[in-house]
Image (spheres, helix red, strand yellow):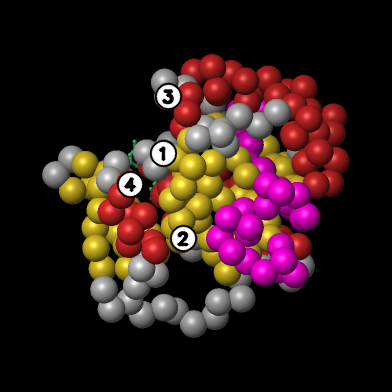
């Protein structure tokens, strides 16, 4: 199989919306993936973000999308208490999805890596932020791989629990952690309490068959 990736353009909107719809339709738990509307995709393709797709023989099989939220009320910087003058330097790792028969090949990580390299080279953006459903383990693992850390757990999108993850591209020194706790993904109360004490979620672990997040500070 020879797969190709390229930037997505406004002309890809119909195919992008169709692939997205098919991925959502196949999800067992629809709450795991917040829906992106056609008009949101259109805005991103027209310059409000960056989008990359992976193609198999010219057919779109997966995509990765970054959004520049600017002064929108949806800017995740507001959720984590960034100063108003920093909101413009926020980029959202907005969505990544792959048709089920093309999963397991790290396609989203590959596309995200290319988009992130461009963001870093541009020096215009500082905070990479994202939301992830607490049990969307593949998505969490992808975010951890790019240095994002869980900094909040709260209701988003009309009542759905979401981790908010953040990576500060200006952070140069490697953080040394003194304390570490491993908490089951389903235990929201303990995780929220640890986050309020300054812990961050830095990794994933499977313990006795149950999904855990490693918190550290
Ligand atoms: C999230 C998604 C895009 C990942 O697909 P992908 O790019 O093919 O990624 P992979 O299947 O290669 O998995 C990524 C990582 O998760 C791990 N993983 C995959 N399934 C897993 C599972 N059930 N449990 C634990 N880890 C898992 C992989 O081993 C890999 O980890 P590694 O890079 O450390 O080896 C895909 O699952 C998807 O399209 N899901 C539906 C849409 C969605 O939820 N998108 C995310 C929110 S925007």
Pinpoint residue 58: horizontal percent, then vertical percent.
71, 26
Tell me which segment is drawn in magenta.
59-87
* Residue underneath mark 3: 29
- Element type where label 3 sits in the image: loop
Q: Is residue 22 above or below residue 160?
A: above
Which tag is nearer the camera, tag 1 or tag 4?
A: 4
**Residue under the image location 80 percent in, 47 percent down:** 48
**Residue under the image location 72 percent in, 66 percent down:** 84
**In this rendering, position of residue 50 left or right of residue 19:** right
Residue lying farthest to the bottom in this orientation: 173
Pointer 1 local density, CA inside 10 Å: few below 14, some 14–19, many at least 20: some
- Precedes in sequence: disc 1 or disc 2: 1
* Residue underneath mark 4: 188
Tell me, for residue 136, which label it has, or none: 1
Q: CB atoms at circles 3 and 4 under 8 Å apart?
A: no
Q: CB atoms at circles 1 and 2 under 8 Å apart?
A: no
């Amino acid at each position: 199989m020879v797969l190709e990736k390229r930037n997505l353009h406004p002309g890809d909107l119909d195919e992008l919306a169709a692939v997205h719809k098919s991925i959502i339709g196949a999800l067992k738990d629809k709450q795991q993936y917040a829906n992106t509307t056609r008009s949101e995709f259109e805005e991103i393709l027209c310059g409000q973000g960056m989008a990359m797709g992976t193609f198999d023989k010219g057919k779109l099989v997966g995509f990765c999308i970054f959004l520049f939220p600017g002064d929108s009320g949806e800017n995740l910087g507001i959720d984590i208490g960034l100063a108003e003058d920093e909101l413009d330097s926020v980029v959202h790792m907005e969505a990544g999805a792959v048709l089920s028969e093309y999963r397991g090949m790290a396609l989203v990580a590959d596309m995200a890596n290319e988009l992130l390299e461009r963001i870093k080279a541009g020096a215009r953006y500082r905070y990479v932020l994202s939301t992830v459903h607490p049990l969307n383990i593949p998505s969490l693992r992808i975010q951890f791989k790019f240095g994002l850390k869980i900094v909040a757990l709260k209701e988003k999108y009309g009542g759905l629990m979401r981790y908010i993850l953040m990576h500060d591209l200006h952070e140069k020194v490697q953080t040394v952690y003194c304390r570490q706790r491993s908490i089951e993904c389903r235990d929201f109360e303990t995780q929220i309490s640890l986050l309020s004490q300054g812990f961050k979620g830095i990794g994933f672990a499977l313990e006795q068959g149950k999904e855990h997040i490693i918190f550290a500070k």
